[in-house]
Amino acid sequence: MQIISSALSLPFYGVAATRRLEQQAAATLAPHTLMQRAGLATAQLALALAPHARRIWIACGPGNNGGDGLEAALHLHQWGKAVLVTWLGAQNEAKVPADALASLVRARAAGVPFATAAPRDHDFAIDALLGIGAAPHPAAANDKNKTDLLGQWLAVLRASDKPVLAIDIPSGLDADTGSSFGPEFIANHTDMQRVGARFTLSLLTLKPGLFTAGGRDLAGQVWWDDLGITAPPDLTPDAWLLGQDRVMRPGRGQAAHASHKGNFGDVAILGGESGVATHMTGAALLAGRAALHAGAGRVFVALLGTAAMTVDPQQPELMFRSPEALALKNQVLVCGCGGGDSVAGVLPRVLSDAARAVLDADALNAIARDTQLQTQLRARQGRGYRTVLSPHPLEAARLLGGSAASVQANRLKAAEQLAGQFQCVVVLKGSGTVIAAPGQLSVINSSGNARLATAGTGDVLAGMLGAFLANGSSAFGAACDAVFQHGRLADDWALHRPEQPLTASALAPMLFI
């Protein structure tokens, strides 16, 4: 068993791959072995997390996830803990899987206490209601009493100010996508804020839904136990968790003594529109400062609109140029940060001439509105150009012709669809940022926190992406490195300045070269 951190990259397996591995393992083991291992692992982790818990509530569903909970209850009861089990399967034992029934018999024989209502006085809970295969909705719920109880117990678990340990995956969370079942089925679950600590023990495999969309909030601290089963080589992961071990951070400390600024590449920032009603120069400056602090040899800033800025007093190293003066074939272009409506007019040249480009914000919105620009974007791959798109969910939705909700419902699929459609690397920002590229397994970033949810942090990321591209990284490698380091800065801030809000202008100076 291991705790999952941002140090180590690990493979993700979705529901289909996990089921295949489970079937292969079960074929070589004695009946009921995997459930017994799962229950023991859960009980051991519960004891480690809450050694002084006086009363433990174990909410069990009617399936095999509930069977895991019954096994955990058996062990905790035998170890002297005061446990109380609520079990949904009592309403229709004929439909309960054989393994779960075997665990029920074992728990009853051991004298585990059962109840029909959630206790009011528990100080630790185990969520064993729904497993990875559960996708309930009203149309499929033919037992109203059962679904009402499920909703009630889930409401108590999610709103509880007591610690909760979920077995395999938090009930109501999609293991593949990180989306949560709707409030029409699970009453009172529209607010994902919670008070008590949350833990999840992912069994057999690590699931992607735990680390993106709503997964990170519902899962809390994630642990993993492979139950003694190793995935065979022919079982291909669905994605990877991006950790520190997979990040190649270029540094000046390893550079040759005779280096000059040209060795570290040029980055040009094109954006920061100013006009009569709006002034977005700050977005371009944030991106430029980030590119400098991330290691670019030189950074040029070309402002759009009526801006006439010639020097950045806080970062005088930035060199200002007109958009027409940029040498697009020799520079990494970061385009769109605060680009406004003006960016549409420069995009045809950008897409045609910039051999390495990061397209962000208003550049993406302009492309979403113009089919000719979309054709130009797709053609870049055939010319050997390197391109990174860095949309947030709404920008991704515009490019896909859908809604932000549909993007968030399956972030992996949306990022991969964008990467395939435009033949470039896609950084889909958000909780569990997804990085996708044609022909490569996607990754979900493990670093970062809610302190990045503030204006301008995306501009900082765009500048970092440009700098890492300028240093010679591949588009996919630059995306992985920049996204992870960007999140790590927020994690370091939370560690050292927990009471201070993080602003975008504070991010770039934290970068080390």
Image: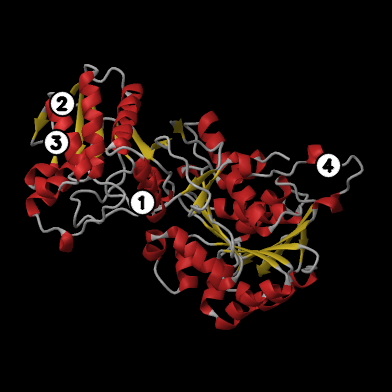
Marks 2,3: beta carbons within 8 A: no
Placement of 395 over or under 172, stated as above or below:
below
Marks 3,4: beta carbons within 8 A: no
Between the C-alphas of marks 1 and 2, the distance is 37 Å
Which residue bears the numbered disc 4?
255
Between the C-alphas of marks 2 and 3, the distance is 14 Å
Quadrant (top left, top right, bottom left, bottom right) of the N terminus: top left
The mark total stands at 4
| Residue type at the position of mark 4 | Ala
Q: How many residues crowd mark 1 within 10 Å: few (<14), some (14–19), many (20+)? A: some
Marks 3,1: beta carbons within 8 A: no
> Residue at 54% across / 72% down in the picture?
421
Quadrant (top left, top right, bottom left, bottom right) of the C terminus: top right
Q: Position of residue 436 (x, y in %)?
A: 55, 59
Identify the element where label 1 is drawn: helix
First along the sequence among labels 1 and 2:
1
Identify the element where label 3 is drawn: strand
Q: Nearer the viewer, residue 4 or 324?
A: 4
Q: Where is residue 298 in the image (x, y as percent from the top left)?
A: 79, 54
Q: In this image, 331 relative to 502: left or right?
A: right
Between the C-alphas of marks 2 and 4, the distance is 61 Å
**Mark 4 or 1, closer to the camera:** 1
Disc number at residue 121? 2
| Residue type at the position of mark 1 | Arg
First along the sequence among labels 3 and 4:
3
Placement of 488 over or under 139, stated as above or below:
above
Disc number at residue 86? 3
First along the sequence among labels 2 and 3:
3
Between the C-alphas of marks 3 and 1, the distance is 26 Å
| Residue type at the position of mark 2 | Asp
First along the sequence among labels 3 and 1:
1
Which residue bears the numbered disc 1?
19
